[in-house]
Image (cartoon, coloured by chain):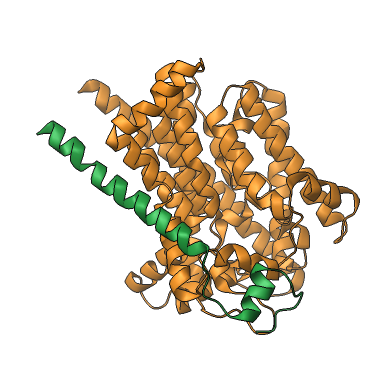
Amino acid sequence: MKVFLKGLLYVPCIGLIAFYLYVIALGFYPQVSEQYRAYYIDHSVSMWQG
Amino acid sequence: MKKTGRRTGENIKTAATVFLIFVLSRLLLTFVACAYNYMTQGYAKTWDLLYKFDALWYVDIAENGYQSVPNSVTGYANYAFYPFYPIVLRFMKCILPDRFTTNQIGVIVSNLCTLIAGYVAVQTVRIKYAEDKGYFIAFLIFFAPHTIYFSMTYTEAMFLMFTALFFYCCGRKHFFLASVAAFFAAFTRIAGVFLVFSLLLFQYEAEYGWSVSRSKLSGFIKGIFARPLRLLGLLICPLGIFGYFYYLYRLVGDVWASAHIQVAWHNSYGSVLRTLFYNLLDSGSGTSSQYWALYAIFGITMFAYLCYKKEFAAAIFGFLAVGISLRTDAIAIARYIMGNFSVYIALYELLRNRQQAKTVVMSTSIIVTGLMYYMWFAGECYFIF
């Protein structure tokens, strides 16, 4: 029983690791406007033109 | 049975003493508010006088939620501010009578958090120094310069409370509870996520002391994976903040939106040393920049002192939490330093056996804090922002 419960605790651990990796992966593909990308991410313009 | 009763009595006495110091500190705040009203011939209420700068953002988030598009003129957006504190304000607003404004609720929540932080801090220092009364650390939390933010609608008090709880739980070796406290700290301010490194150091110290070898390190790492509760504790720490990042992706389309939005407020210097150098010598905003840079040096010195005292877990949290802000700029760094529990541990360790220095620090703190409240009320003082 103890071993089973111990094993069960790994399930949320794996879930959390998967969630963190998923969020990090989403970070590489921002779904934003051109203006947003230029000002906030690439810093290629110096004024926000939202 | 007798021992438990004695301990309960002792805890009540501690709570009462901490409460008394807290009331004295808020008496100072109210006295300064009265003095300010007298000088300006005004009748403003204390919570209205405290309602400035970031407090307006937190009230906005609590009342209206997060905006999906930055302001078209300024480029600012309220998702730069982390969610747990506004969530609590919103929840409290739902259960309290309508006569309470969101700002008043913020003031109540922050003061309550400060009081709890003071009590937990006293209990934390007693773990290491059982012979100490430890009230000095509560005094510092209530009276030290730049602790004025603990009495207003700012996240600092809540963040301090959770970090104090984290260090208390680690001191008692309740590591899973410590990770829950770290989870809430990180949900309140992103700097809380660095508590995961402190947790690792506390766990290592509990097993091996500060003796480091390759076999002990590998045994420690293996131990983490072999004990799922310990692993779960470590993984829980950043959950709130990753949840927020995911929410931002859904809202704005950018996981790192809360970091990217910072560019609208100020440019980044890119490294701690560059920030210190430019703020000290080539200051763009005059003396306030130099003040912040010197305050940053004070903070770093305190964290270095913690290393000297072998308080590595507290030191690493201080270095990383303050370092992440300093990488961008030194703006408002005094607030971040005095909102970091590691500084209080360092100051306590430094002054606990120096009665004369303690008296000087206590007297100076009361005067400076009183002055800072006055400057805050006047609303023109950029350097305490």
Q: Residue at x 43, y 23 (%)?
A: B218
Q: Colour of chain B?
A: orange
Residue B314 in picture, x, y percent from top left: 55, 33
Say if B155 sits above or below B180 in the image: below
Whether residue B101 is visible, yes or no, is: no
Determine the residue located farthest toward the left in the rendered image.
Answer: A1
- Work out whether B74 lies above or below B112: below
- The answer to whether one can see residue B329 in this image is yes
Left or right placement of residue A41 versus residue B239 in this view:
right
Q: Quadrant of the N terminus of chain B?
A: top left
Looking at the rendering, which quadrant does residue B371 occupy?
Answer: bottom right
Q: Where does the image place residue B236, in percent across and percent down from the top left?
A: 37, 47
Q: Quadrant of the C terminus of chain B?
A: bottom right
Query: Between B361 and B71, which is closer to the camera in this rendering?
Result: B71
| A32 and B101: which is toward the camera | A32
Residue B99 position (above or below residue B111): below
Residue in the image at 49% along x and 29% along y: B125
Front residue of this view, candidates A5 and B40: A5
Give the left or right position of residue B95, taking residue B350 as reference: left
Shade representing chain A: green
Q: Position of residue B3 (x, y in %)?
A: 26, 21
Q: Which quadrant holds residue B350?
A: top right
Q: Measuring from the top left, give residue A45's x and y in whole percent.
A: 75, 75
Q: Which residue is drawn at 53% across and 42% down?
A: B21
Query: Quick one: which residue is furthest to the right in this view?
Result: B281
